[in-house]
Amino acid sequence: MTAAAAVNRRGTREHRLSDGYIKMIEKAGGVPIVAFSAEKPLLELGGGLLLTGGGDIDPPLFGEPLSFNNLAIDREKDELELSLAKWFIRNEKPVFGICRGMQVINVALGGTLWQDLENQLGTLHEDTAHDVLIAPESELHGMFGGRLRVNSFHHQAVKRPADGVIVSARAGDGVIEAIEHNSLPVFGVQWHPEVASDGMPDMTSLFDKFVRGAEK
């Protein structure tokens, strides 16, 4: 899994990771390893890749000019996570993306993002509990049925799904909230299943799916 990075007042980079991710991986029977580089020996230790939440992805990385000045971009983190995602996808190992992580998956596969939902679509997804509608033929539907209460807070989102990517859930305003690949063990959700929010069901099954795949 990857950790959010920031430069402190001393000019050195710090990496932070919510313990919710670690606890859910451990609950599912996995052993978390935090990746700070894409060195091959480190990559080969991992049976799967969990891409966590975080800041915005730099638009030139998905073929668009930077159009808004409110994006919190860390190009070094973007490039690391895209490199990791591409390696695991190329080697057909499981990849699970959460919030920003789902966006990284889509960009790594060649898709695009909405840079800013409020400015481009006139919608807000800021720490709001809401329902998503789940596609009937998706794996997600088999886990949760046709409707699910979630806790999304983000202002970038999947715009054009990459080739091979299936949209498995949308919010009521049409924003894509979950994706899965049609042939690879790759999937993502826009909400935060590692956080136990009011009204949300137990999300352990998402981490179980990821860890079981990584064990193979």
Image (spheres, helix red, strand yellow):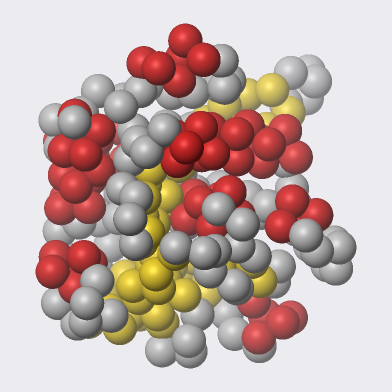
Q: Which percent across, then down, holds residue 51?
A: 45, 42
Q: Residue at x 35, y 36 (%)?
A: 93
Q: Which percent across, then down, holds residue 159?
A: 60, 73
Q: Is residue 181 left or right of residue 41?
A: left
Q: Which percent across, then down, holds residue 31?
A: 25, 23
Q: Is residue 69 above or below residue 159?
A: above
Q: Quadrant of residue 132?
A: bottom left
Return the residue found at the far top.
Answer: 41
Looking at the rendered image, the quarter that the N terminus falls into is: top left
Q: Residue at x 39, y 65 (%)?
A: 179
Q: Is residue 55 above or below residue 74?
A: below
In this rendered view, identify the residue nearer to me: 4 or 140: 140
Q: Is residue 111 left or right of residue 188?
A: right
Q: Residue at x 54, y 57 (%)?
A: 106
Q: Residue at x 41, y 82 (%)?
A: 171
Q: Is residue 1 above or below residue 59?
A: above
In this rendered view, identify the residue nearer to me: 48 or 133: 48
Looking at the rendered image, the quarter that the C terminus falls into is: top left
Q: Mark yes or no: residue 68 visible.
A: yes
Q: Quadrant of residue 110?
A: bottom right
Q: Is residue 210 left or right of residue 111?
A: left
Q: Quadrant of residue 138?
A: bottom left
